[in-house]
Image (cartoon, rainbow, N blue to C red):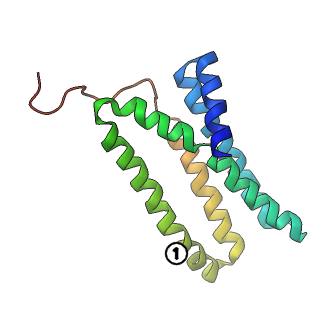
Amino acid sequence: MTPFGGWISDRLVERYGSRAGRRLVPLAGLALSARLLGWGVSVSQPSLAAALPSLALGFASMSDGPFWATAIDIGGIHVGAAGGILNTGGNFGGFLAPVLTPYIASHFGWSWGLYTGSLIVMLGIVAWLFVDPMEPAATDSLPGEL
């Protein structure tokens, strides 16, 4: 769903501008992801228990294109650093998830391990409320340039 999310975001940018176009896909995709993951914990049918977390991952992945496009927009001439920060954050989360989820599950049960994942996704939604794709980096010059 990553290409689909990028395509939707591009259409929204054309119609509503960068601020709304870059924000709407992550806000909606992450909200759906958190809800589907939370719902997936509580179902008893094996097919739903497999489908709902899979859909949750897909809706979270819809945000990848807007994440990168926003990093490019905000980064300005420092786009490499902005991309590096974005990639490092994503990889750090990818490192922590398989460590923290079973740890939480061993103490509180698997449901709470997955509910914690939903909570972290919701924190991502809150973070997006503070991201302004229209606001470039503080400076558009390299150190030492006038």
Q: In this view, does 2 lie to the left or right of 76?
A: right
Say which residue label 1 marks: 99
Name the residue furthest front: 3
Can residue 44 be seen here? no
Q: Residue at x 63, y 45 (%)?
A: 2
Residue 87 image point, x, y percent? 42, 52
Q: Which residue lies furthest to the left in this view?
A: 144
Look at the image and tell me in which quarter the C terminus lies.
Answer: top left
- Total residue callouts: 1
Q: Would you place residue 31 above or below residue 69 in this image? A: below
Q: Is residue 63 above or below residue 13?
A: below
Residue 143 makes an appearance in the image: yes
Q: How crowded is mark 1: few (under 14 residues within 10 Å), some or many (20 or more)?
A: few
Residue 26, image quadrant: top right
**In the displayed structure image, the side of residue 125 where residue 43 appears, left or right:** right
Q: Is residue 92 left or right of residue 109?
A: left
Q: Quadrant of residue 74?
A: top left
Task: List x then y, in percent, for residue 85.
Answer: 36, 48
Expressed as whole percent of the image width and height from the top left, the position of residue 21 reads: 59, 26
Q: Is 76 positioned to the left or the right of 143 in the image?
A: right
Q: Residue 20 at what x, y percent from top left? A: 58, 24
- The residue that appears at 39% across and 55% down in the rendered structure is 88
